[in-house]
Amino acid sequence: MAPFVPLPYGVQAEIVHQLGTEIISNRLWFRYNFLPFGLPEVVGVADGVALWWTTHILPYLSQDLITAQVTVKDWTADPPPWTATTVINVAGGVASESLSANVAIVVPFKWPLGIRLKKNKHYVAGVPESEVTLNTPSAAIRDALFEGYNSLIDDARLFFPLFSWWWVAASAWEAGSLRTEQLSYEVQGTRLDRAYILGQRRKRLSP
């Protein structure tokens, strides 16, 4: 596990899935407009991410993928002062077998113009076999993920309490050393859908 580096004003949201016998997760970061925040605000992020994922992303993934829950932790201190979990237990919406758990579509997030740091990205598992030809994701699933992830920019502003949360990209490292605090900027969406390629999740499967 990576060393803890606090995110000022921020939380980490972890989306947890099961695909066969594998447990898979992806992280998102959100920053609050004001301090302090408490349990109601953390619950608001957990509920909001769960609604976004099940509305915009999960319907385009294989029915073999079960999204179990979203867990959100206050990332201002360790141990986290506040934690909330929203249970989902919903399968993907495509009636097609999934590619193996170590294969995913890579969705990179965009920093603001002029910021050149290592990209935050998601490795989206549960890719339907029917949406891949010769190791290339179909235009349909690329378009769906492009629209779905970009919708999170506006959806995050509707998390409880309204207009208080921003989806951010975060950096914990600088020149090979840990920062004392994570650097974060508002995400400017994702790259063009044609940039979405298949990648390997081997180092990203949960134990």
Image (cartoon, rainbow, N blue to C red):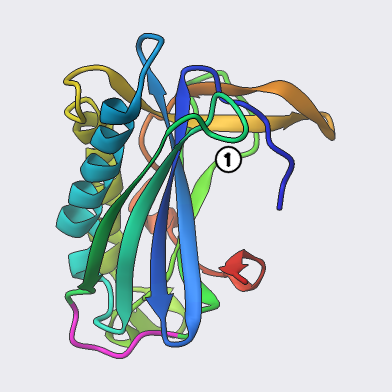
Position of residue 76 in the picture relative to residue 16 (left or right):
right
Which residue shows up at 23% across the image and 62% down it? Answer: 88
Residue 121 position, x and y percent, is 50, 48
Quadrant (top left, top right, bottom left, bottom right) of the C terminus: bottom right
Q: Main secondary structure of the magenta part?
A: loop
How many residues crowd mark 1 within 10 Å: few (<14), some (14–19), many (20+)?
Answer: some
Asked where in the image residue 115 lies, by quadrant, the reply is top right
| Element on which disc 1 rests | loop
Which residue shows up at 31% across the image and 84% down it? Answer: 64
In the image, what residue type sits under mark 1? Lys
Position of residue 59 in the picture relative to residue 125 (left or right):
left
Query: In front: 31, or 186?
Result: 31
Tell me, yes or no, if residue 132 can be seen here.
yes
Residue range (magenta): 94-99
Q: Is residue 114 above or below residue 124?
A: above
Residue 62 position, x and y percent, is 28, 79
Residue 13 position, x and y percent, is 42, 43
Q: Is residue 29 above or below residue 121?
A: above
Residue 131 lies in magenta, yes or no?
no
Q: Is residue 45 above or below residue 144?
A: above
Residue 116 position, x and y percent, is 63, 27
Which residue shows up at 47% across the image and 55% down it? Answer: 26
Tell me, yes or no, if residue 191 can be seen here.
no
- Residue bearing the label numbered 1: 119
Query: In front: 6, or 113?
Result: 6
Which residue shows up at 53% across the image and 30% down it? Answer: 75
